[in-house]
Image (cartoon, rainbow, N blue to C red):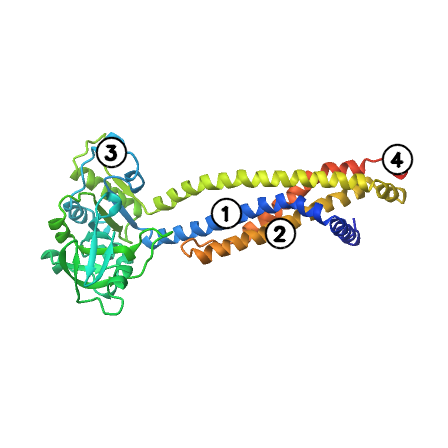
Amino acid sequence: MTRDEAFENVYLAFDTLKANKLRSGLTILGIVIGVTSVIAVASIIEGLNRFVQMKVEAFGPRTFFVARIAGGQRFGSLPEKLRKRKFINFEDAEYVRETCPSLKTATAFVTRAFFFGETNSISYENERVERILLRGVEPEYADALPQFSAAIGRFISAYDQEHARPVVVLGNDIASSLFPATEPVGKIVRLNGKLYEVIGVLEKDSGAFGGPGIDQFAVIPLSDFRKNYPNSKEVAIAFIVDKNSTVEQGKDEVTQAMRRRRRVPTMAEDDFELISPDFISALWKQLTGALVILTGVISSIGLLVGGIGVMNIMLISVTERTAEIGIRKAVGARKSDIRLQFLIEAVVLTLIGGILGIVWGGLIAFVVRTLAPSVPATLSLTWVVLGVAISTGVGLFFGYYPANKAAQLDPIVCLRYE
């Protein structure tokens, strides 16, 4: 088929669609719904995946954590063997620092939070903030997790830790709420009923998807935390592998040090978790996997309905244009020409639905990103191409039977058709 013939078939397809606007519109509605749902959900998930990966990469590829229980397990029902694990001690971090030459630093920290069943509040004069996250840290904590660096003032110092000084570094949101019009550093706040001096404000970080971020943290010396909250026992250790050592070497040293420290028998499995920040993205992908499957099922139903509608309208079109098919065959049109003509009409029909679906999906992603900045929906070229491919495939699959039926019609019978 020449290029002129191809354009002629496309023009003919549009003329046919314009002649039956309502019927064509209802037919492509299923395609629009199917492609819109695919594009919208895929855009949202892809944007979220990038956002989660960006958060994970902020930790750095050499940062790891040691905990009694992994974060994802902590919120579910724990098996008995996990519940019976010994708590990690504050002194374990010092032992790891001293016995693991491949590490740049290792530091203990502990968190007191509402999702552990503990409440915290902080106030200054008439301002009060509830449900903050309180974390006790050592001075090395900011080296292990640079996200906790102070943007204003300073971080916890060795002197603060040594003397268990009542000082606090506030998250950005907490500082803004307590001190909307004044400088926070140097002010005295009341944290869980006790007086603390504000020595710094952390870098801004609102967290992911509306969840708690660094902005909701208040950080105090670990020594002061231990003195005031002896019942908070879920201690964790953050460590960074030195750039002159391999990551695996550093992880092995920490694992062996913790096993010695906790007197784990040689053949027994570890009674602690060595956690990479990658577990966050892995957990996220598991959660979004179910959503992708559900969306795929819903989209498939929409595309199936749309495809059946395309097949139906093409069969009606073949019947209505039987005489036209006969004339075309009488003047020399081959079966392949007739088949291609009706296939092009079916593809044009589904492509219109696909393009509309891509536009609507992109608009939904834009609205979601605008109304909820913590959900950074992103429409990528990959999904645009996939949307076009899906709609084209539906047109070819469901349009082939009517097109082939038209191609097989006897020209004599067609010319006699009324």
Q: Is residue 362 left or right of residue 223?
A: right
- Identify the residue under disc 2: 355
Disc on the earlier residue, 1 or 3: 1
Q: Are marks 1 and 3 in contact (CB under 8 Å)?
A: no
Q: In terms of secondary structure, where does tag 3 sit?
A: helix
Count of number-bearing discs: 4
Measured Cα–Cα span from mark 4 to mark 2: 38 Å
In the image: residue 172, left or right of residue 233:
right
Q: Is residue 156 visible?
A: no
Q: Quadrant of residue 125?
A: bottom left
Q: Nearer the viewer, mark 3 or mark 4?
A: 4
Q: Which residue is mark 1?
A: 41
Residue at 43% x, 55% y is 372
Q: Could you tell whether 114 is left or right of 378 in the image? A: left
Snapshot quadrant of residue 201: bottom left
Q: What residue is disc 4 on? A: 413
Q: CA distance from mark 4 to mark 1?
A: 50 Å
User: In the image, what residue type sits under mark 4?
Assistant: Val
Type of amino acid at the residue the image marks with label 1: Val
Residue 200 pos. (x, y %): 21, 63
Label 1 secondary element: helix
Give how far apart the Cα atoms at labels 3 and 4 are. 79 Å
Dot 1 or dot 2: first in sequence order is: 1
Helix, strand or loop at label 2? It is: helix
Residue 40 in the image: state x and y as whole percent: 52, 49
Indicate whether 309 appears above or below 161. Answer: above
Distance CA(mark 3)–CA(mark 2): 52 Å
Instruction: Estimate the spatial distance between the alpha carbons at disc 1 and disc 2, rounded to whole Å.
Output: 16 Å
